[in-house]
Image (tube, rainbow, N blue to C red):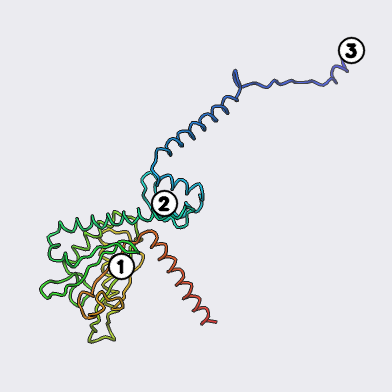
Amino acid sequence: MSDKNQEQQPIIVKKKKGHGGHHGGAWKVAYADFVTAMMAFFLVMWLVAQDQKVKEVVAAYFNDPVGFSKAYSGSILEGGGSAIMENINLPKESRVEFEKMVQQQLKSAGEQILATLKDLPEFEQVQSLIEIEMTAEGLRIQLIESSSESTSGFYKLGSRELNNKGKTILTTISRELMKLKNNIVIEGHTDSRRYVYDKKYSNWELSADRANSARKLMEEVGLPKGRIEAVRGYADNRLRFEDDPYDPRNRRIAIIVLNDYAETRFKELQSSEWIAGHGQQMISDN
């Protein structure tokens, strides 16, 4: 063969594919499958050992992961955080049981608050003026004015300012409420006695100002500002003793620790009221 033909002959390079060791990378896939299977096995074994409430929460997540993330925050292991279950796809019986559990937690908190208050020197003077009870909204703590002239209540007479006993009692309550995560509503109420200068300052202002002064003290003590959902002033529209509207015990503030269900309904109500109010404004503007 001539030198010219040798120069024109193409050069062919053959590359051999390696196997990455003795057995290639196939073992990695098999190992990953094994680890996944073992993880699933241990998760199943863990779940079998849990109580019914934890199983229901796990089931709720797999039924509706997106809705669960919006409705539930906290640790499944601790059972903490917000436990709003209304939007989770659970049987009605399970939701009822979960709501009972949330109510029991607030009831226990109320018992702890009362036990802490009993250690205060001032408690003996005002114990009959403090009411702690469970309601549909949640835990209601009421500080009631006294009907006796010899026993003062929690506010200076006719004033929005807390007296010393009121500050001590409310500070103690606030520190206990800081241990919870539930939001709070503060209400102010009065009796039906009218001010001499009613047009300048009425029971509406007094009830709202007393509730607001309670809020200020609670936040000064350390309660996060985001925990206060609302401050309401009702004047004498929600009397404690309707048959005696002038009874001083109608004057009171109420601290409501909302359960998760009441909090949801409260926010929905606020939203509907906002929409209704702005809707009317838009109609009037047009």
In the image, farthest residue toward the left? 150
Q: Who's the residue at 49% across and 79% down the image?
A: 280
Q: Secondary structure at mark 3?
A: loop
Question: Pointer 3: residues within 10 angstroms few (<14), some, or many (20+)?
Answer: few
Left or right: 18 in relation to 123: right
List x then y, in percent, for residue 5: 88, 17
**Residue that numbered label 1 is attached to:** 186
Kind of element beneath mark 1 = strand
Determine whether label 1 and label 2 are within 8 Å by CB.
no
Quarter where residue 156 is shown = bottom left
Q: Earlier in the sequence, mark 1 or mark 2?
A: 2
* Occupied quadrant, residue 257: bottom left
Residue 135, position as x, y percentages in the image: 32, 64
User: On the image, numbered disc 2 is attached to which residue?
Assistant: 73
- The answer to whether residue 203 is left or right of residue 58 is left
Is tag 2's residue or tag 3's residue first in the polypeptide sequence? 3
Bin the neighbour count of mark 2 within 10 Å (Cα to Cα): few under 14, some 14-19, many 20 and up. some
Decide: marks 2, 3 in contact (CB < 8 A)?
no
Does residue 77 sit above or below 285 in this rendering?
above
Q: Which kind of residue does numbered mark 2 sit on?
A: Ser
Could you say which is closer to the camera, residue 120 or residue 162? 120
Q: Nearer the viewer, residue 72 or 60?
A: 60
Residue occupying image coordinates x 26% and y 58%: 110
Residue 103 located left or right of residue 66: left
**Upstream in sequence: badge 1 or badge 3:** 3
Tell me the CA gap for discs 1 and 2.
Answer: 25 Å
List x then y, in percent, for residue 285: 52, 81
Residue 232 position (above or below residue 21): below
Whole-angstrom CA distance, mark 2 to mark 3, is: 84 Å
According to the picture, the residue beneath numbered tag 3 turns out to be: 1
Identified by mark 3, the residue type is Met
